[in-house]
Image (tube, coloured by chain):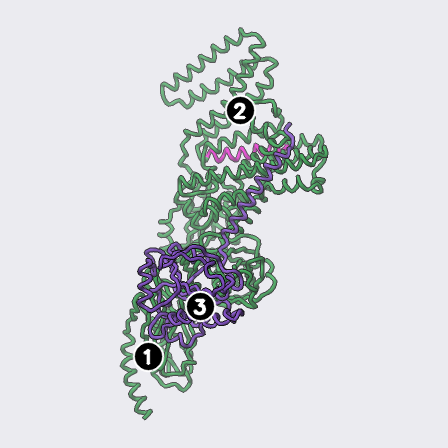
Chain colours: A purple, B green
């Protein structure tokens, strides 16, 4: 008669642990957790930019970082880059003056609307006088998914400690009309001085509006 | 001045009014847009319905009042182009939207495709003098893969007079759309925090008894639009689990939106509070209409399903083996051994479910379709199970002892008191219990079958864990073990009693086999079983009267050529059978001259061969057995039944006939129960006849890829499934797995 041994128990316990671990990791993976304002922003490492550099969130420690999800053909993006008004361009240059790192992110997959190769991304920005610090090329959509970016534009403000200070819409009026820019409250403009002063912005998150990000 | 202006306006207006009768919709680019009204002539002081009508290009869509994650809803800017105060113009009423999963699991929009009319009411002042001009700009975002903001000029002239004259074209469009605007829920709605999710519970006369896919569309952005919403139904209503927009968000005071349940839709405003009673219990069809139900919930279902397996009559006898092991271990005060038993039993169950998962995945990979009951459609597997169950029955009866006979390795291992024994008891329990799918399992499996391989394995393993759980707990909790009865002579009696349910299961499986492969195949399995029983008996008795036994063996062996002669279809087969008879006659002569010891050895050998042949021969026959093409005609006396096909359903529904489809199979117990207790009863047959319901039968006994796909389409893992197409409806209502006379006649009456 086979008796109970420590080895047998070890085997059985091992099996149970394996099942439990698999279950746990599957649950963890299936949860598509969106980042939370006030908590650490998702860290990203070595993303290719249009200038050929690779940048990581860690490169900008101590600085405020703005992430702008964009798709140059999306009517909502066109609205904010439209001339006159040049809303997004003014935000970018204003941020640069305040030593804020402004990063455009293009998460459109190849063949989808808004997809740009490095050179095309640079000339697109030149053409519309856009001056971001960097333009991250994210054709895989991994950065977009990490931040749960849903629309273009979709804005994120990260403070010098790497915490998410604001996420959501660029402003308060959900439309494609340029005339609405003047009437709307710009959440990014509102958040940046608070972050610079080390305070929590009045609005820390809002529902973004725009075109869906053209993921693969 | 105003007089002149008004006169001029009147003139212009009259001209335009004439034109507007023939006005064509304006093409905005990807949609034809038109302003319509229900009145050709309206009276002052009344409220008139208008509508903004969209005819949208294929694959393009516009947005609901809440567009979801991306997009914006249409709007009208009237500016100065309307000759009455704009306060008199109310905002849009929004007909129920559809889900637009842009990136599954990540971006979800709500909107409209094809055609939609957005109605709005206009109150005419008492002192109004007509005609009234409505001129404005309709702005809307229209998207396919890309989005385009379109803008069209809309114009309509409403004539005012002393009497109402309807504009039938506009009135029809607006009425149809208003019918799709969700009415307020009559009942209660509550929002409750539940771990990381929110539970929206709805109860009341609107929702009690409703079933089907359910989905909540919020007016705001409080929840994650793209997340799956799992649904539970209870006697009073239903509950949906919602994922907050951001983790840890606090529960809002109120949550408003609309909720769709099957074909019904209601406007809901839920207030924070305790979950309403009676709104959960059984899982809904498949929860949300979005592919991929949440894994943790599926696993919860799987666990419960596994627990329920323990109560199934086809598992209980095997569990008794396990219980006896525990009884003897605890009687000796050996708690460590009891625990080892529990663990090894769990491991055995898990190993079996893992193997099953692998088999399911292999079949899915090979056929593209996986159906839980598939292994009841394979004559070889059914034959093997009949014989194994028969063997276990013989063992329970005490026909043979374990640990001595070579032929019953599996059962031998199962009966050992040690870890290997516990492991194989687990295997045995799983093998016998797996096909008893309760309704829980059906829902969970139906949802998981279309998921990734890892999820299929995980869910099946969870089910196994659920099945093993009661014994695992029992073996670890000494307190609970006290509830196990003391061992004694009753155990042997009980063991023997359990043999009979097993024989009944074998008989049921035999009927399945008969339906699958014909009565001859069933007869061969019975013959094989007899041979096994004979072999076991001969082996035991080999010591005494060996010669007599050997002669008996030969006598029984005559069955083979006799069967051969009966079923012979060619001269060769007849010759072969006669050759067999001749060989047996020679054997009789040889045996008569043998000495006792040698004949005992030969008798044992032959007995072993008999058992082996009894197992192998039916299996070999099953391999060649062709599935018969004579499925059940059980309904023939009651209905003019027709075989189901998607084309036939389309044809009948196009004729406006009500259609009832019974997805059934010979081996499905629930199907047979529904048939006897509901579908073949007098009230149901009479109701069907009176309402001229077409009764279609989809027979899944032998498996059928078209039926399998239809089952999968409705998120079911197997039969039974009942579809009800009300007269004139193109899309069916999926009925519960357990039918009742009231339910079915109620449906028919509601339709006629």
Q: Chain of mark 3?
A: A
Please say whether residue B171 is visible from this viewpoint. Answer: no
Q: Are marks 3 and 1 on the same chain?
A: no
Q: Main secondary structure of the magenta part?
A: helix
> Residue beneath label 2, please?
B530
- Residue with the most extreme top position: B593
Residue B157, numbered circle: 1
Please say whether residue B396 is visible from this viewpoint. Answer: yes
Distance (Cα) linking label 3 and label 1: 58 Å
Residue A99, numbered circle: 3
In the rendered image, residue B507 lying in the magenta stretch gets the answer yes
Crowd class of label 2 (few under 14; some 14 to 19; many from 20; radius 10 Å): some
Q: Is residue A35 above or below residue B172?
A: above
Toward which corner of the image does residue B83 lie, by quadrant? Answer: bottom left
**Magenta-colored span:** B497-514
Toward which corner of the image does residue B427 lie, by quadrant? Answer: top right
- Residue with the most extreme bottom position: B1
């Amino acid at each position: 008669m086979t008796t109970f041994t420590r080895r047998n128990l070890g085997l059985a316990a091992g099996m149970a642990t394996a099942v439990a671990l698999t279950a746990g990791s599957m649950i963890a993976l299936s949860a598509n957790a969106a980042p939370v304002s006030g908590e650490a922003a998702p860290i990203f490492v070595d993303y290719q930019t249009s200038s050929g550099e690779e940048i990581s969130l860690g490169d900008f420690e101590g600085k405020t970082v703005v992430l702008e999800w964009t798709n140059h053909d999306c009517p909502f993006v066109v609205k904010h880059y439209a001339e006159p008004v040049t809303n997004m361009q003014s935000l970018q240059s204003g941020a640069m003056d305040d030593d804020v790192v402004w990063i455009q992110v293009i998460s459109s997959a190849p063949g989808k609307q808004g997809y740009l190769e490095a050179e095309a991304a640079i000339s697109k920005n030149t053409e519309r006088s856009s001056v971001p610090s960097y333009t991250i090329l994210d054709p895989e959509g991994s950065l977009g998914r990490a931040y749960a970016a849903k629309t273009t534009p979709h804005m994120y403000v990260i403070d010098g400690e790497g915490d998410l200070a604001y996420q959501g819409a660029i402003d308060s009026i959900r439309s494609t009309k340029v005339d609405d820019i003047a009437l709307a409250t710009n959440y990014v403009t509102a958040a940046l001085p608070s972050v610079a002063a080390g305070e929590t912005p009045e609005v820390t998150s809002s529902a973004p509006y725009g075109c869906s990000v053209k993921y693969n | 001045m105003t007089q002149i202006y008004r006169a001029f306006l009147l003139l212009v207006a009259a001209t335009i009014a004439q034109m507007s009768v023939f006005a064509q919709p304006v093409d905005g680019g990807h949609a034809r847009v038109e302003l319509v009204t229900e009145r050709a002539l309206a009276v002052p002081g009344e409220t008139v319905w208008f509508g903004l009508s969209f005819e949208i290009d294929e694959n393009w869509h516009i947005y609901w009042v809440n567009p979801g994650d991306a997009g914006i809803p249409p709007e009208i800017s009237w500016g100065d182009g309307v000759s009455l105060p704009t306060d008199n113009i109310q905002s849009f009423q929004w007909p129920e939207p559809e889900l637009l999963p842009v990136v599954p699991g990540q971006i979800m929009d709500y909107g409209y495709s094809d055609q939609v009319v957005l109605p709005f009411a206009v109150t005419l002042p008492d002192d109004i003098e007509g005609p009234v001009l409505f001129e404005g700009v309709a702005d809307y975002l229209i998207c396919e893969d890309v989005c385009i903001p379109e803008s069209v000029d809309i114009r309509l002239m409403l004539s005012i007079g002393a009497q109402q004259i309807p504009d039938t074209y506009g009135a029809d469009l607006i009425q149809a759309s208003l019918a799709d605007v969700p009415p307020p829920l009559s009942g209660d709605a509550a929002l409750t925090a539940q771990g990381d999710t929110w539970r929206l519970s709805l109860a009341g006369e609107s929702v009690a008894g409703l079933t089907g896919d359910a989905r909540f569309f919020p007016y705001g952005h409080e929840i994650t639009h793209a997340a799956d919403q799992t649904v539970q139904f209870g006697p009073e209503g239903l509950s949906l689990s919602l994922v907050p927009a951001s983790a840890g968000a606090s529960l809002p005071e109120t949550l408003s939106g609309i909720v769709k349940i099957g074909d019904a839709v209601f406007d809901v405003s839920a207030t924070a509070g305790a979950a309403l009673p009676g709104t959960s219990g059984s899982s809904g069809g498949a929860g949300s209409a979005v592919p991929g139900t949440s894994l943790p919930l599926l696993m919860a279902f799987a666990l419960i399903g596994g627990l329920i397996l323990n109560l199934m009559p086809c598992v209980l006898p095997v569990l008794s083996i396990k219980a006896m092991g525990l009884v003897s271990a605890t009687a000796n005060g050996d708690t460590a051994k009891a625990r080892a038993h529990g663990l090894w039993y769990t491991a055995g169950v898990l190993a079996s479910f893992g193997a099953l998962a692998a088999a399911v995945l292999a079949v899915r990979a090979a056929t593209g379709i996986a159906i839980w009951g598939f292994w009841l459609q394979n004559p070889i597997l059914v034959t093997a199970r009949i014989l194994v169950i028969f063997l276990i029955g013989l063992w329970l009866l005490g026909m043979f002892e374990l640990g001595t006979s070579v032929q019953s390795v599996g059962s031998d291992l199962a009966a050992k008191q040690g870890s290997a024994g516990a492991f194989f008891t687990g295997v045995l329990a799983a093998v016998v219990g797996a096909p008893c799918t309760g309704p829980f399992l059906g829902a969970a499996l139906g949802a998981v079958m279309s998921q990734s391989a890892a999820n299929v394995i995980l869910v099946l393993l969870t089910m196994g864990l659920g099945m093993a759980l009661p014994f695992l707990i029992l073996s670890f909790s000494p307190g609970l073990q006290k509830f196990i009865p003391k061992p004694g002579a009753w155990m042997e009696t009980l063991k023997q009693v359990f043999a009979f349910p097993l024989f009944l299961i074998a008989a049921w499986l035999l009927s399945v086999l008969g339906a699958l492969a014909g009565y001859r195949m069933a007869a061969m399995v019975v013959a094989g079983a007899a041979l096994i029983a004979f072999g076991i008996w001969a082996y035991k008795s080999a010591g005494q009267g060996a010669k007599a036994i050997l002669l008996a063996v030969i006598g029984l062996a005559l069955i083979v050529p006799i069967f051969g002669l009966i079923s012979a279809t060619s001269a060769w087969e007849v010759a072969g059978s006669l050759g067999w008879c001749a060989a047996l006659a020679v054997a009789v002569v040889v045996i008569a001259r043998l000495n006792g010891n040698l004949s005992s050895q030969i008798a044992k050998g032959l007995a072993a061969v008999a058992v082996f042949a009894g197992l192998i021969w039916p299996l070999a026959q099953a391999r060649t057995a062709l599935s018969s093409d004579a499925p059940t005609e059980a309904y023939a006396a009651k209905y003019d039944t027709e075989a189901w096909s998607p084309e036939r359903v389309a044809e009948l529904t196009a004729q406006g006939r009500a259609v009832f489809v019974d997805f059934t199979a010979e081996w499905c117990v629930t199907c047979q129960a529904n048939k006897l207790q509901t579908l073949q009863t007098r009230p149901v047959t009479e109701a069907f006849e009176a309402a001229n319901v077409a009764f279609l039968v989809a027979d899944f006994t032998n498996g059928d890829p078209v039926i399998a796909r239809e089952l999968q389409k409705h998120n079911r893992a197997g039969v039974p499934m009942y579809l009800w197409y009300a007269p004139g409806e193109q899309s069916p209502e999926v009925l519960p797995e357990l039918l009742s006379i009231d339910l079915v006649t109620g449906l028919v009456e509601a339709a006629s």
